[in-house]
Amino acid sequence: MNNLFLYVVTVLIWGSTWLVINYQLGTVAPEVSVVYRYAIAATLLFGWALMRGMKLQFRFFDHVRFLMLGVFLFSFNYIAAYMAQEYISSALNAVVFSTMMWMNIINTRLFFGTQIEPKVYFGAVMGMVGVLILFWPSVSTVSFSDRTLVGASLSLGGAVLASLGNMVSARSQREGLPIVQSNAWGMFYGTLITALVAVRQDAVFNFDFSAAYVASLFYLAIFGSIVAFGSYLKLLGRIGPHKAGYSLVMFPVVAVVLAVMFEGLAIELHIVLGIGLVLAGNLVILGLGVLKTMYKNGLRKRFNRAELAVLTSLLFDRKVLKEKPCENC
């Protein structure tokens, strides 16, 4: 799969999870839902690896890497994000968490010595300003009380952990560890860690058998975890965390577009301006060459039929929760 397809899939799926997560809240404690989500995802990934005859036995030090993925990318960062939303709005949470893009840029320079092109900094600034404008009505009304500071600190802490997880994945890929098995073991360890946290907090391991909860849970496990993380981490290994991290600025835009389509959110000037700036920053970072190639070769030549089928279902099919991931993608 080409990089553009991986990027688009990551942005579309993670943008849609903002809407889907609403169906997870209420009956089941958030951390328990996270346990269910990654338990399902890990089980499916292990099953896929077994069917494909993939290697599942690794050295002790490889498992240390997998454990680090579980800690940084599949447990505590999600716990921090959920806890933050108990103190601040989802809009402010999204803005704070999107600073992970800057953390990826800085950490890529620190851990790998990667020279960052000036256009990446410029595009990143455009994207952050665009996100602020996009959520300005909610952000502008925030009073910096103790609750806000606690929530913002939790969200920022979650972003720091997730960025460190990105660095672990990038290093693991450079050393030849496969993405599918790394994610399977990482999600397994993340499930155990989150379950221990839930037990520590005396959370009840109940279950909601409603169609909305079950469908959203499997969507988040299959698409939000397996497909999106697989696409994002593969992209991260190819173009680096500093560029792949821009998807964190793009998916709030997708979330707003879905809110306009399905929740009746009114299209206002700040939404148009915010989306415009984020998209412009995206073009600056990824380069205009992508668009030139698409224009020259045509969209159907750029993506194969299987890839187009997945993109079409993600963009237009309201029953996407019932779809199975494409086997050829």
Image (cartoon, rainbow, N blue to C red):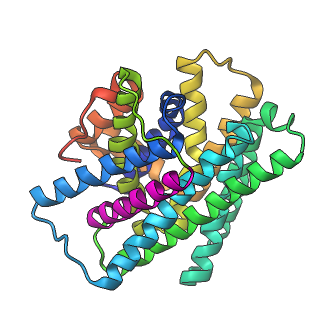
Considering only vertical position in the picture, is 213 above or below 305? above
Q: Nearer the viewer, residue 8 or 43?
A: 43
Relative image position of residue 252 (x, y in whole percent): 60, 40
Q: Residue furthest front?
A: 202
Considering only vertical position in the picture, is 128 above or below 142? below
Relative image position of residue 181 (x, y in whole percent): 26, 65
Relative image position of residue 84 (x, y in whole percent): 68, 47
Instruction: Quadrant for residue 322, please give it.
Output: top left
Residue 245 seen in the figure: no
Considering only vertical position in the picture, is 279 above or below 284? above
Q: Please tell me which residue is depicted at 49% across the width and 53% down the height of the picture.
A: 199
Relative image position of residue 90 (x, y in whole percent): 67, 37
Residue 237 lies in the magenta-colored region: no
Residue 45 seen in the figure: yes
Residue 200 lies in the magenta-colored region: yes
Instruction: Tell me how many marks there are.
Output: 0
Q: Please tell me which residue is depicted at 67% across the width and 61% down the height of the picture.
A: 157
Q: Please tell me which residue is depicted at 62% across the width and 69% down the height of the picture.
A: 105
Residue 254 located left or right of residue 45: right
Q: Nearer the viewer, residue 273 or 55?
A: 55
Residue 198 located left or right of residue 256: left
Q: Magenta: predominant secondary structure element?
A: helix
Q: Please give the range of residues in magenta.
A: 180-201
Q: Quadrant of the N terminus?
A: bottom left
